[in-house]
Image (cartoon, rainbow, N blue to C red):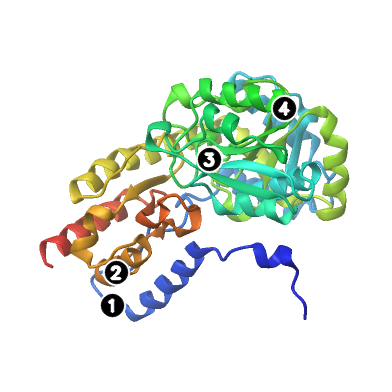
Amino acid sequence: MRITQRAQRIEPFYVMEVAKAAQRMALELTGHEWPMLYLNIGEPDFTAAPLVQDAARRAIETGLTQYTPATGLVSLRHAISAWYQSHCGLHIEPERIIVTAGASGALQLACLTLIESGDEMLMPDPSYPCNRHFVSAANGQATLLATQAQDRFQLSPEQVAQHWGPATRGVLLASPSNPTGTAIAPSALSAIHEQVQHHGGITMVDEIYLGLSFDEARASSALGLDERVISINSFSKYFSMTGWRLGWMVAPKSLVPSLERLAQNLFICPSTVAQHAALACFEPESLALFEQRRLAFKARRDYLVPALKALGFEVPCAPDGAFYVWSDCRPLYDRFGVDNSWDFTFELMKRAHIALAPGRDFGHHETEHFVRWSIASAMPELERAVQRIQHVLDNP
């Protein structure tokens, strides 16, 4: 059967390949004093807040399980709008908010609405692989631009100006980003957006980790620039609802009818139960819990970054948010007998029973020497990981 070129362009998700290898090895470690530690997947160890779970049960028990509008429950759109006001100091009209089947659904809708065949979107290298694949699935071209530590692995206004060409449609950014956890400086984001608008292009920003910002100076939403920014967000990360598959998009009013038509045809609506449950995210009790969890992630970052440096890893940028640390493992190559992070990942898995995400997924610029650590795991697991690596280094 013929497979489309579109499908063939999508690369494997190597993080999941590592996860499968780790799971196979874990079966062999039953009863071992060092069971497998999974620091490879970006999923918080916290689950949905108690009020959210209660709301889901009530929705099922009372039959609130039928279709909603394609753009989501009106009450949920208003609740998200109120969150932007309280959390970011921004007035975002509910009519601009479209509730989606996860941030992935929002990205798919945005790309299919705005990207024509052959259009180019500029993106940083490294960046989250699925984002560039959404561009590719819309028959666009994701052009990765090499970033540097001095720019916190984010695109600079100078890069955007230099690489903007006849086919360029816009930029797809992430702040805080996956895999680096770094955020875009507000001044740089403003300058990039100004250039994009000068060309009549698209500024699309993945802000799914916005709620998990640690640095107040970089914690502002791109929506503060103007109403032409498209922001993608999610209930998965800050609100700890990964498997509920619920997200949202904020778009210019002029785009909403087109986005709604696509949503009607592609998704009908997001999960009704998840939407009713998500309303409870904005209760004061839930918001207080999410803030406690944000501080817990920050404490994990504050522990792991210096611990990794002490082990010999290079950490060019401490993350501003999210739950990742992007580290260069070249200083440890000789100790592990490898010359790239892919082999390093498997050697570390074999020796210390720790699963990490090798840089291969995230781009091409020096990513073969980096690994991503997830601090979504509890502090005791991070401490055990550091102790195991130290033991391996002390006992070659």
Amino acid at pointer 1 = Gly
Answer with mark 1 or mark 2, whichever residue precedes in sequence.
1
Q: CA distance from mark 2 to mark 3?
A: 32 Å
Indicate the position of residue 304 as horizontal and vertical percent values.
Answer: 29, 45
Q: CA distance from mark 3 to mark 4?
A: 34 Å
Q: Secondary structure at mark 2?
A: helix
Indicate the position of residue 53 as horizontal and vertical percent values.
Answer: 60, 49
Answer with mark 2 or mark 3, whichever residue precedes in sequence.
3
Q: Residues within 10 Å of mark 3 (few under 14, many from 20)?
A: many
Q: CA distance from mark 2 to mark 4?
A: 48 Å
* Eye-nearest disc, 3 or 4: 4
Q: Residues within 10 Å of mark 2 (few under 14, many from 20)?
A: some
Which residue bears the numbered disc 3? 238
* Eye-nearest disc, 2 or 4: 4
Q: Residue sitting at 34 percent across and 64 percent down?
A: 345
Q: CA distance from mark 4 to mark 1?
A: 61 Å
Which residue bears the numbered disc 4? 199
Which residue bears the numbered disc 1? 31
Q: Secondary structure at mark 1?
A: loop
